[in-house]
């Protein structure tokens, strides 16, 4: 008797698990009550999108894992059978990239494939994600500007659209050349220094482990090594420099001599650092040395301000 019950139960168990796995297989083909139909079905009604798609990176058969090798249009728009059956139309049974879908839902469509790709791996740490900026705020799949990366607009305009205060900084007299080409090289981009998709370093999403490492990528000569270091330099370039723009020459945070005086005062120095205030405050005759405080001021003598291997006072 007991054996028969056991036999019956095990038959029941196997039947149930068979039915269950069939349901699972069916579900993997279905999402939101619809099925995948393939890009050819979309072509008739959305020829413009289709023609661009097959010519773009996502439409390249040679790239394994590209949408064309997966579910085509439906890799991003989700299964479209119902949309097609109902003859298409706005808001009809298809995933769209606008306010109708949450930012997380939109991003996840792209992250399905891009989560582990170079450049995107730190998306979860990015300030953009935490402020609900989405992939499609910066990228347009169907109407990108010419060039790489499916960008909605060219840099820096893309970024200035939301970062107006940064635009103001770049309009200052001294600035990093993002608008102009300079001798023989291309203009910089915001993304020369930032990764808008996030970096391991949460602060300001810069493409290096520290501010100084970022600067050294392009200003390697400032790394030294110097026999005589000027302590603030290896610590942080931004003690003395603005990075986007400044109204003082050379991107300085303040003009000389004020910037020097913010750290050096007369006490303990062999020459006073406030020569304007006292006629007898500097070595030598007044006309010989005092006029060296005009123009480049302290820098007339302390010319190698980032460090020197010849002079502990950076005068050579
Ligand atoms: C029978 C014609 C037809 C077919 C086939 C069709 N669509 Fe559409 N679709 C339309 C029409 C009409 C609209 C509304 C007009 C518009 O926005 O262009 C639309 C709108 C859309 C929208 C925007 C929806 C919205 O609410 O803003 C998307 C996305 C879309 N279709 C994707 C697809 C995809 C993907 C396929 C293939 C799986 C497909 N369509 C197949 C006719 C069709
Ligand atoms: C089905 C997988 C898949 C989906 C979904 C997908 N991508 Fe891609 N994407 C790829 C592959 C594969 C490449 C090519 C990568 C390479 O060249 O190594 C690529 C390349 C790109 C590139 C670089 C293009 C270039 O010119 O080099 C951008 C930007 C991009 N995708 C953005 C997006 C965005 C935004 C979304 C969501 C709206 C998205 N992708 C959805 C697979 C996908
Ligand atoms: C704030 C704007 C912004 C957002 C948000 C954004 N991107 Fe980008 N993305 C860019 C820019 C700008 C580039 C071009 C970088 C360059 O030229 O070096 C780029 C490049 C890429 C590339 C090309 C690979 C690379 O490193 O150059 C891929 C892939 C990509 N983005 C995917 C995504 C995905 C997926 C999301 C959402 C999770 C996303 N992006 C969100 C601005 C953005
Ligand atoms: C890599 C992801 C991705 C793929 C693949 C993709 N789309 Fe889209 N689609 C988007 C995004 C993102 C938008 C929002 C507008 C934009 O970014 O250009 C969109 C918008 C649309 C719209 C609304 C109208 C418009 O142009 O803005 C239609 C229609 C559409 N897609 C149809 C298609 C069809 C048809 C295919 C296949 C040939 C396709 N999409 C493939 C991501 C994708
Ligand atoms: C759709 C609007 C939007 C676009 C486009 C955009 N950003 Fe942002 N960005 C934001 C928001 C919102 C924040 C978070 C709030 C803030 O710090 O202003 C942010 C934050 C940042 C931060 C970090 C600020 C911090 O304090 O850590 C950087 C760096 C940045 N964006 C760079 C860029 C770059 C580079 C581009 C162009 C490739 C760009 N952004 C395009 C909206 C945008
Ligand atoms: C030469 C490198 C460089 C370039 C080019 C650059 N940035 Fe920055 N940016 C930085 C550094 C470094 C910081 C961090 C400053 C700090 O730590 O105080 C920063 C900070 C920021 C911040 C956050 C702090 C703030 O002032 O709000 C935003 C937003 C930002 N940058 C946006 C942009 C945009 C937009 C562009 C292009 C128009 C751009 N950056 C170009 C290096 C750069
Ligand atoms: C991606 C390359 C790049 C990075 C990173 C970079 N710079 Fe520059 N920097 C340039 C270019 C290009 C110029 C203009 C041409 C020149 O003078 O060499 C410049 C010019 C300058 C100038 C002179 C500006 C003037 O008005 O003459 C200063 C100061 C400066 N950078 C400081 C920094 C600091 C500080 C950092 C780090 C926060 C930094 N740079 C990061 C490329 C870069
Ligand atoms: C103690 C203040 C101070 C610090 C810290 C500092 N700088 Fe400077 N920097 C200056 C001054 C002052 C000038 C102007 C020099 C001149 O006009 O002769 C200058 C000029 C520059 C210039 C343009 C002229 C040139 O010499 O190429 C660059 C580039 C530069 N600094 C990069 C850096 C980098 C990179 C760092 C960090 C490693 C840094 N600075 C740290 C004060 C400083
Ligand atoms: C952020 C603070 C800071 C700024 C700004 C700064 N310095 Fe310095 N400077 C220091 C420190 C700290 C030392 C090391 C002092 C010591 O060893 O007693 C130093 C050392 C020096 C020395 C060598 C003196 C010695 O005793 O070894 C000279 C010369 C000097 N600075 C000149 C300048 C000039 C000129 C400027 C303006 C362009 C300037 N500094 C801006 C912090 C600063
Ligand atoms: C006329 C040339 C000249 C000018 C201009 C000048 N210095 Fe000096 N400074 C020197 C010389 C030379 C030394 C080396 C010490 C000595 O010979 O007394 C020195 C030494 C220093 C020292 C180290 C002194 C100590 O003993 O700790 C500091 C700090 C300093 N200068 C800062 C400044 C600042 C800040 C300015 C601008 C306000 C400035 N200097 C302008 C020539 C000059």
Image (cartoon, grey):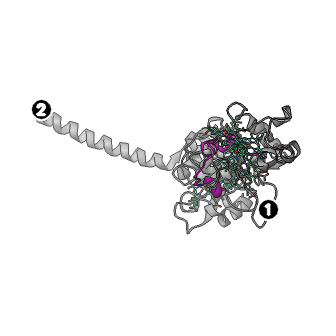
Mark 1 or mark 2: name the one nearer the start of the chain: 2
Element marked by disc 2: helix
Residue 307 versus residue 37: which sits nearer the camera?
Answer: 307
Classify 10 Å Cα crowding around label 1: few (below 14), some (14-19), many (20 and above).
few
Residue 104 seen in this snapshot:
yes
The residue located at (53%, 45%) in the rendering is: 31
Question: In the rendering, at what x and y percent does residue 61 appear?
Answer: 57, 67
Ligand 7 within 8 Å, label 1 CB: yes
**Quadrant of the displayed image that contains ligand 10:** top right
Residue 2: numbered disc: 2
> In the image shown, does 105 or 188 lie closer to the viewer?
188
**Where residue 113 is drawn, which disc sits there?**
none
Start-end of magenta stretch:
219-247
Q: Residue at x 62, y 50 (%)?
A: 214
Q: Is residue 87 visible?
A: no
Give the SS element for disc 1: loop
Looking at the picture, tell me which residue is in the foreground, 311 or 107. Answer: 311
Residue under pointer 1: 182
Residue 43, horizontal then vertical, whole percent: 68, 61
Task: List x then y, in percent, for residue 147.
Answer: 72, 62
Position of 162 with respect to 24 (left or right) is right
Report the label total: 2
Quarter of the picture containing the N terminus is: top left
Disc 1/disc 2 C-alpha distance (Å): 89 Å
Locate the C terminus by quadrant. bottom right
Residue beneath the point at 83% across and 46% down: 289
Question: Magenta segment: does it hold 228?
Answer: yes
């Amino acid at each position: 008797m007991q054996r028969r019950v056991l036999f019956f139960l095990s038959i029941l168990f196997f039947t149930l698990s068979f039915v269950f796995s069939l349901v699972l297989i069916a579900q993997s083909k279905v999402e939101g009550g619809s099925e995948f139909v393939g890009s050819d079905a979309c072509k008739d009604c959305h020829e413009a999108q289709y023609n661009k798609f097959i010519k773009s990176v996502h439409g390249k058969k040679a790239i394994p894992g590209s949408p064309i090798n997966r579910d085509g249009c439906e890799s991003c728009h989700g299964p479209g059978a119902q949309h097609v059956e109902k003859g298409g139309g706005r808001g009809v049974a298809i995933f769209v990239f606008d306010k109708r879908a949450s930012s997380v839902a939109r991003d996840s469509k792209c992250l399905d494939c891009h989560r582990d790709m170079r450049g995107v791996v730190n998306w979860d740490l990015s300030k953009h994600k935490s402020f609900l900026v989405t992939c499609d705020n910066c990228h347009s799949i169907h109407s990108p500007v010419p060039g790489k990366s499916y960008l909605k607009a060219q840099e820096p305009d893309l970024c200035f659209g939301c970062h107006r205060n940064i635009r103001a900084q770049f309009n200052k007299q001294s600035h990093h050349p993002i608008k102009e080409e300079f001798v023989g090289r291309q203009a910089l981009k915001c993304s020369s220094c930032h990764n808008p998709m996030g970096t391991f370093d949460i602060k300001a999403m810069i493409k290096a482990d520290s501010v100084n490492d970022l600067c050294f990528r392009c200003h390697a000569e400032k790394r030294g090594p110097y026999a005589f270091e000027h302590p603030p330099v290896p610590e942080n370039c931004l003690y003395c420099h603005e990075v986007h723009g400044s109204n003082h020459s050379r991107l300085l945070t303040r003009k000389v001599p004020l910037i020097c005086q913010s750290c050096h005062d007369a006490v303990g120095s062999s020459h006073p650092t406030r020569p304007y205030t006292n006629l007898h405050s500097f070595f030598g005759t007044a006309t010989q040395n005092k006029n060296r405080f005009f123009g480049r001021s302290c820098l007339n003598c302390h010319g190698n301000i980032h460090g020197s291997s010849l002079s502990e006072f950076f005068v050579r």
